[in-house]
Image: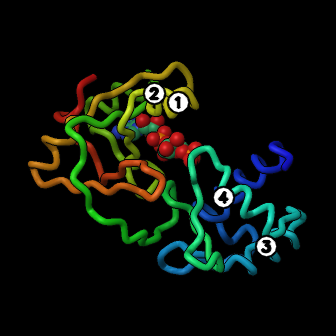
Amino acid sequence: MNEKIAKSVSKFLSLVLRHSPETINLKLDENGWADVEELISKCSQKGNKLDFELLDYVVESNDKKRFAFNENKTKIRASQGHSISVELNLAETEPLEYLYHGTVGKFLENIKKEGLQKMSRQHVHLSKDKETAIKVGSRRGTPQILTVRSGAMHRDGFKFYLSDNNVWLTDEVPAKYIDF
Ligand code: HQG
């Protein structure tokens, strides 16, 4: 399989399954699922040649397992990262004592004031290891890694969710729980 093509399909799927399904006139249900046949046919109509084999390859080989099929592979959704409102029905999960968030220097002043906010997404994204947080921060420049005292937050009543692809999600992280 051509990796360049797979990457470009993955980017396009992120766009239509997380942010703007209307780009190809696709309908997502309230849980974020799209019909696989409809997705394939609407992508192809818009010139993004896609067939089931390629879609299956992208889902299975994706570095971050960003997308998931339902059991019989008739539906597909993004496992996290949405900006549109979808109910992922993720189970509330007790977090590890510490989780990490990768950001960049220019945001620190604001984060010290307001804590971590979900910004344009549905949740604040956290990871269990610093390596992942470094990668996330590096998308924007020199990474700055914040340590979140998630255990303390949880004991204080904040809820945490673990996505199907192991990204920790929460609604916000007040600054007092962040070690800068
Ligand atoms: C920052 C990618 C100012 C926050 C990644 C981040 C991740 C604030 C940016 C996933 C702030 C939001 C999500 C505040 C937060 N003031 N800046 N109060 N609170 N920020 O992209 O975590 O490859 O929405 O630090 O790997 O960077 O797409 O979040 O820099 O898992 O699958 O505002 O996206 O995954 O940016 O990334 P994002 P993120 P994919």
Q: Amino acid at mark 1?
A: Lys
Q: Amino acid at mark 2?
A: Glu
Front residue of 174/51: it is 51
The residue at which mark 1 appears reads as 135
* Residue at image mark 4: 59
Q: Is residue 44 above or below residue 8?
A: below
- Dot 3 surroundings within 10 Å: few (below 14), some, or many (20 or more)? some
Tag 4 secondary structure:
helix
Q: Is residue 150 above or below residue 22?
A: above
Seen at 73% across and 67% down, the residue is: 23
The nearer-to-camera label among 1 and 2 is 2
Helix, strand or loop status at disc 3? helix
Which of the numbered marks, if any, corresponds to residue 40? 3
From the top left corner, tell me how far across and down residue 71 is, in percent. 56, 76
Using the numbered discs, state the Cα–Cα distance from disc 1 to disc 4 in whole angstroms: 21 Å
| Viewer-side residue, 180 vs 155 | 155
- How far from the left and from the top, in percent, is residue 141? 56, 23
Q: Are the residues at dot 3 and dot 4 in contact (C-beta closer than 8 Å)?
A: no
Rendering coords of residue 51 (x, y %): 83, 68
Asked whether 4 or 136 is in front, the reply is 4
- Under mark 4, the amino acid is Val
